[in-house]
Every structure is written in structure tokens, then in C-alpha cells.
């Protein structure tokens, strides 16, 4: 069975054709990053306009890349939420028109379920049950995937999402939008052990909290800017931003330089520690043997390797999608759509975009 997937929940206009939920025949993605970069973040009204301009061409591209005609597909899967309502409406309206004109069934897909399904595309052998850490610009969840259509939220963020935290810190230190991938690049040039930022853990919950960490990093930046009369955003990757006193490990107190890259590395280490610790604890509690990563932040090289390492130490298998399937794309939506379709979950042409779907409800 071949499904056309459509994804327009944020700033990527994407259409893809996937066979039997596993085989990507095409995955056309038009990214609006260059447009939104000018404003330092996604401007919802502009995102909607761009989706309208591009959607037809992107769908045509998906068919051309797969070498198929409109009649060759068996149905349409579309992201209906959560996301920016204007942006979602573009994809939902397009998908409904397509379904109506071609008499094809329509399947509505929850965006986070789509992110999880990206793992089925990169790992053809992967089957539930597994535990999934979903970390993107808008979401940070640990989800227990019992089977293709049964999800249970084990933990979630109580404030900012992990990707949002990366983007905000990146912006303060002068990295272009979207900051996550830039932080990853910069952190590789630094030493993550020089600056120790707070890691918040709750006594009786595996929920995440990133706002305190974000504030601590931003306060540190303001402090050194005032102390040294510098503007970190104007400095180069490996320029010195501070001199800090260190002690420990049997070494007497000594002064070391801290660079902008060390700051990025210290911040990244804190985020990765929080994510990996809670995910491994959740896996132990649930008796999970397999852990999957999903969402844009799952591209992060430090998170990937730390999770692999700690997973292996605990006898757990860890997997993640290839980077292009971690960030927003329609192939993951078509994959999830297949499992919903197989479960009889088609929808009518009265489908509407839903910007804030309670995840529990959307997950059911
Ligand atoms: O899944 P996604 O494309 O969109 C949402 O559904 O939110 O995720 C985008 C997020 C952005 O916050 C971006 O900065 C982050 O993923 N991201 C990364 C990396 N690549 C993308 N964060 C950390 N390290 C990366 N390498
Ligand atoms: Zn996403």
C-alpha cells in the first residue's frame, strides 16, 4: 500500500510517498529556514503563506521522484496537529481536496506519532514495544510505545522543550536560526567539562525542566559580558569569553580560559545529561529493552552517542532515524498514516487543523 504524506505543521513544506509504512519512495522537503532566519525564528503568518505557495510544487516533486501518478496511491496521510494553526490548515486543506478529487481515503496523523514513526523508516526491523524519547522544537516527551497504536506518556517537559532551549541559547550567543544544529557544531570545538550548569530532576517524576538551565546559561553570559565588557554574540567560535578558577581532581586551584565553544559544550552536556538520565531511568522502570530517539534534537551528535553508550552499559538497544527523518518531513507522516490506516482509522472531509491537541488524546 502506498500513502501520500503531507506535513506543514511549522516551517517545512513536505510531501512524501511511502510504501507499507516502511519504504520511502520519495520525500520532498521545502524548508523555509532562509526566510525565517531574517527574523530569528518562525513567523507564523509568513510560514502559512509559504506553505500555500509551495505545496503544489512539493507534492508534484514527491510524485515525480517516486515515478508515480496521482492514481497510483492508496490514500493520503496528513498532519492535523499540533503545530501552527495557519500552517497546519494549508496541509489539511490540500489533503482534503486531494482526497475528494481522487476519491482516496484520508488519515489524520498526530505530529509526534509521526516523529516516532520516523524510526520505522530508518530501521526496517524495529517493532514495538519500545520507549521513545521525542525531543523537538516544541516537544520533549518520553513515550512508551506498546504497539503501533498504543502510546503512553511516561514523562514530559514542565516548561521549555529541549529544541526551544537550544534555539534560545544559540540566539543569545549570536548563532543563526535554527540554533540547534549550530550549537552542535560549536560544541564540538569546545570542552564540555569546564562549565557546570544545573540539571533539574524532580524527586518523584521523570519530567523534564529546561527553563532553569536556560536562565543559568543566559545569566552566565550576561555576567561575563559585564565583567569583561564584551558582547559574546560578536565573538568567534573559539574566542576567549572568560577566565575561571578551577580546582579538584587533586589539582590545586588554577585559572583556565573559557571560550564560546566551551560554553556551548557545557550547555549541551547539561541537556544531554538530563535527557539520557531520565530516559534510562524510565526504560528501567518500564522494563524496556529498546530505546528510540525522535524529533529534531535527535540529530544532536552528543545526544546520539551518549544514549548509545549509556544504553549499551544497561544492555539496551538504542536507535535513531537518519537526520533528514529526525526533523520535520512527510515520510514519517505517511509511515504513521499506514499504521493508523491498517487499524481502520480513516477520517472524513470535515477534518480540521488542531493547534493544541492534548497529547494524551492525540495519542489514543
Ligand atoms: O522536529 P523539528 O524539525 O520541529 C518540531 O517539531 O519542533 O525540530 C526542530 C528543532 C529545533 O529546535 C532545532 O534547533 C533542533 O530541532 N535541532 C537540533 C539539532 N538539529 C535540529 N538541536 C540540537 N542539535 C542538533 N543537531
Ligand atoms: Zn516536528
Image (cartoon, helix red, strand yellow):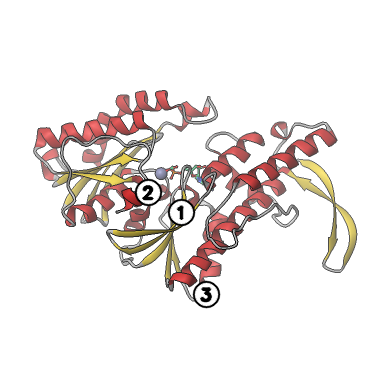
Local crowd size for mark 3, using a 10 Å CA cut-off: few (<14), some (14–19), many (≥20): few
Dot 1: what SS? Answer: strand
The C terminus sits in image quarter: bottom left
Q: Is residue 269 above or below residue 87?
A: below
Q: Is residue 318 above or below residue 36?
A: below
Residues at marks 3 and 2, CA–CA distance in whole angstroms: 29 Å
Residue 359: mark = 2
Do residues under tags 1 and 2 come within 8 Å of each other at their CB atoms? yes
* Residue 66 vs residue 246, the one in the foreground: 246
Location of residue 215 by image quarter:
top right
Q: Position of residue 274 (x, y in %)?
A: 59, 57
- Report whether 229 appears left or right of 352: right
Q: Is residue 280 above or below residue 178?
A: below
Local crowd size for mark 2, using a 10 Å CA cut-off: few (<14), some (14–19), many (≥20): some
Local crowd size for mark 1, using a 10 Å CA cut-off: few (<14), some (14–19), many (≥20): many
- Report whether 44 appears left or right of 188: left
Q: Point out the residue furthest to the bottom here.
A: 315
Residue at the spot of label 1: 141
Residue at the spot of label 3: 314
Residue that appears at 57% across and 63% down? 277
Residue that appears at 69% across and 33% down? 233
Viewer-nearest of discs 3 and 2: 2
**Is disc 3's CB within 8 Å of ligand 1?**
no
Mark sitting earlier along the chain (1/2): 1
Q: Is residue 357 above or below residue 177?
A: below
Amino acid at each position: 500500500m502506498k500513502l501520500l504524506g503531507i506535513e506543514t505543521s511549522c516551517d517545512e513544506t513536505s510531501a512524501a510517498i511511502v510504501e507499507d509504512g516502511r519504504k520511502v519512495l520519495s520525500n520532498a522537503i521545502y524548508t523555509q529556514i532562509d526566510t525565517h532566519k531574517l527574523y530569528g525564528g518562525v513567523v507564523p503568518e509568513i510560514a502559512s503563506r509559504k506553505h500555500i505557495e509551495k505545496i503544489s510544487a512539493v507534492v508534484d516533486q514527491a510524485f515525480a521522484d517516486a515515478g508515480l501518478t496521482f492514481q497510483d496511491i492508496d490514500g493520503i496521510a496528513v498532519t492535523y496537529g499540533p503545530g501552527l494553526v495557519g500552517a497546519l490548515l494549508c496541509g489539511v486543506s490540500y489533503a482534503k481536496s486531494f482526497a475528494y478529487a481522487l476519491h482516496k481515503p484520508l488519515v489524520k496523523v498526530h505530529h509526534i506519532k509521526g516523529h516516532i514513526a520516523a524510526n520505522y523508516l530508518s530501521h526496517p526491523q524495529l517493532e514495538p514495544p519500545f520507549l521513545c524519547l521525542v525531543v523537538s522544537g516544541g516537544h520533549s516527551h518520553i513515550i512508551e510505545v506498546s504497539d503501533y497504536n498504543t502510546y503512553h506518556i511516561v514523562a514530559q517537559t514542565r516548561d521549555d522543550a529541549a529544541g526551544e532551549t537550544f534555539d534560545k541559547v544559540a540566539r543569545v550567543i549570536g548563532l543563526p536560526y535554527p540554533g540547534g544544529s549550530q550549537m552542535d557544531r560549536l560544541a564540538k570545538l569546545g570542552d564540555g567539562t569546564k562549565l557546570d550548569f544545573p540539571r533539574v530532576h524532580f524527586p518523584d517524576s521523570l519530567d523534564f525542566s529546561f527553563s532553569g538551565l536556560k536562565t543559568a546559561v543566559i545569566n552566565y553570559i550576561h555576567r561575563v559580558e559585564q565583567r569583561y565588557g564584551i558582547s559574546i554574540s560578536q565573538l568567534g567560535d573559539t574566542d576567549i569569553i572568560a577566565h575561571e578558577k578551577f580546582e579538584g581532581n587533586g589539582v590545586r586551584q588554577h585559572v583556565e580560559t573559557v571560550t564560546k565553544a566551551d560554553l556551548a559544550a557545557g550547555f549541551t552536556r547539561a541537556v544531554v545529561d538530563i535527557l539520557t538520565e531520565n530516559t534510562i531511568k524510565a526504560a528501567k522502570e518500564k522494563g524496556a529493552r529498546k530505546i528510540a530517539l525522535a524529533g529534531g534534537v535527535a540529530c544532536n551528535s552528543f545526544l546520539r552517542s551518549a544514549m548509545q553508550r549509556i544504553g549499551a552499559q544497561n544492555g539496551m538497544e538504542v536507535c535513531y532515524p537518519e537526520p533528514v527523518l529526525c526533523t520535520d518531513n512527510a515520510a514519517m507522516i505517511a509511515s504513521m498514516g499506514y499504521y493508523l490506516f491498517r487499524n481502520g482509522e480513516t477520517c472524513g472531509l470535515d477534518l480540521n487543523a488542531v493547534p493544541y491537541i492534548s497529547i494524551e488524546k492525540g495519542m489514543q
